[in-house]
């Protein structure tokens, strides 16, 4: 539970709109945080208080100038079209970013990671951006550990998200971190989006169309989710899908962007997180219910996924729910 979430006050989220902004991404923070039962106030500003050119055929007027950034608990920089990505910060943009408080959380959506990198905020950090511009990002900012396969990266004070709709994922993650899964799940239902998305950005990267044949592994994925507590193997999954192991593994990777084994671990960790948040079951019992052989295995995989132990995770999110 972050200090922001524990304070009980309304957190101010300031969205920074830059020229070339995508209207969809600009609206994500207001839509997600605005559905969080009054826990957040969302304001929008520009570097000079003037309207900004969008990537669509209209200009967007904003209510605030750069001074609003100094009041933000969280700053979200919305993405812009590639033609508008800065190779270096303009004096106006640099001055605006300098107003952000040292303790404020900073979030980029999609190509806005270039702005954070140009400001030096991502040096030595793990980050992500849209898969189409990953190579350009690497060339421009070699000091950033860029991961093109994930939907978002939470590196403490700084969070980066991948293309477009991954802004929804990172905003829901922030709500969950601040106020627990119950509120985050309620926000997801109100916005008609999944509270978690399977796989990562890799599933959206352009690649050859899978060979014709049985069209999808979706039915087998749904079946696996109903049998997570069982020791599922690649052979079990392929048998259910009526495919060879090799064909199933290839098709699964094409559709999900992960190997079947990695996907199963991800789903088991997600189910374990839910049980840690919503029940008082012992860790060993939760491990058995989600398909990990031992509590030690659950501890290992949870720590690898989010960097904390089951006990620490439970304390954080159950405390959030109580508050």
Image (cartoon, grey):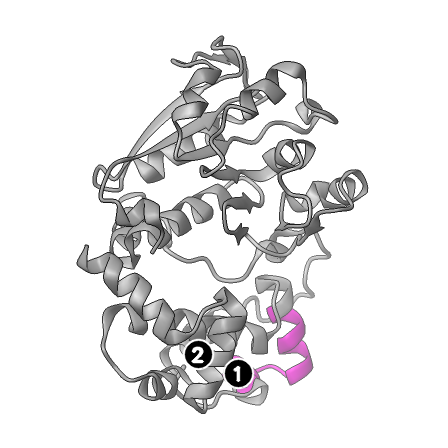
Decide if residue 217 is in sight here.
no
Q: What residue is shown with label 1?
A: 237
Instruction: From the top left corner, tell me how far across and down residue 289 is, in percent.
Output: 34, 85
Q: What residue is shown with label 2?
A: 224
Q: Is residue 245 magenta?
A: yes
Q: Main secondary structure of the magenta part?
A: helix
Q: Is residue 244 magenta?
A: yes
Q: Are marks 1 and 2 in contact (CB under 8 Å)?
A: yes
Magenta-tinted stretch: 237-252
Q: CA distance from mark 1 to mark 2?
A: 8 Å
Q: Look at 57% across and 66% down and name the residue there.
A: 215
- The image quadrant where one finds the C terminus is bottom left
Instruction: From the top left corner, tell me how far across and down residue 206 is, in percent.
Output: 69, 50
Q: Secondary structure at mark 1?
A: helix
Q: Residues within 10 Å of mark 2 (few under 14, many from 20)?
A: some
**Residue, far top:** 50
Q: Which mark is residue 245?
A: none
Most foreground residue, 264 or 145: 145
Most foreground residue, 249 or 5: 5
Vertical side of 61 occupied by 249: above or below: below
Q: Look at 41% across and 51% down and name the residue there.
A: 173
Kindly indicate the quadrant of the structure image that contains residue 250.
bottom right
């Amino acid at each position: 539970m972050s200090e922001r979430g524990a304070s009980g006050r309304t957190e101010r989220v300031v969205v920074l709109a830059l020229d070339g902004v995508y209207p969809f991404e600009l609206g994500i923070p207001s839509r997600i945080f605005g559905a969080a039962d009054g826990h957040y106030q969302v304001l929008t500003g520009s570097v000079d208080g003037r309207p900004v050119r969008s990537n669509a055929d209209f200009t967007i007027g904003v209510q605030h100038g750069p001074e609003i950034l100094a009041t933000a608990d969280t700053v979200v920089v919305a993405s812009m079209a590639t033609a508008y990505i800065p190779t270096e910060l303009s004096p106006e943009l640099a001055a605006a970013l300098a107003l952000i408080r040292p303790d404020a959380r900073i979030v980029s959506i999609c190509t806005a990671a270039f702005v954070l990198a140009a400001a030096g905020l991502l040096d030595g950090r793990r980050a992500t951006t849209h898969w189409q511009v990953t190579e350009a990002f690497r060339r421009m900012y070699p000091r950033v550990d860029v991961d093109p396969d994930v939907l978002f990266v939470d590196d403490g004070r700084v969070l980066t998200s991948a293309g477009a709709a991954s802004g929804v994922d990172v905003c829901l993650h922030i709500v969950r971190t601040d106020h627990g899964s119950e509120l985050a799940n309620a926000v997801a239902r109100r916005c008609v989006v999944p509270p978690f998305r399977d796989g990562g950005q890799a599933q959206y990267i352009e690649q050859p169309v899978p060979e014709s044949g049985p069209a999808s592994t979706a039915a087998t994925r749904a079946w696996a989710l109903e049998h997570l507590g069982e020791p599922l193997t690649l052979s079990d999954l392929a048998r259910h899908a009526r495919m060879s192991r090799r064909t199933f593994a290839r098709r699964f990777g094409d559709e999900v962007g992960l190997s079947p084994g990695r996907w199963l671990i991800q789903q088991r960790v997600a189910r374990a997180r839910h049980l840690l948040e919503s029940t008082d079951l012992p860790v060993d019992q939760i491990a058995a219910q989600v398909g990990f052989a031992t509590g030690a295995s659950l501890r290992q995989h949870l720590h690898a996924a989010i960097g904390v132990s089951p006990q620490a995770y439970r304390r954080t999110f159950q405390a959030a729910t109580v508050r």
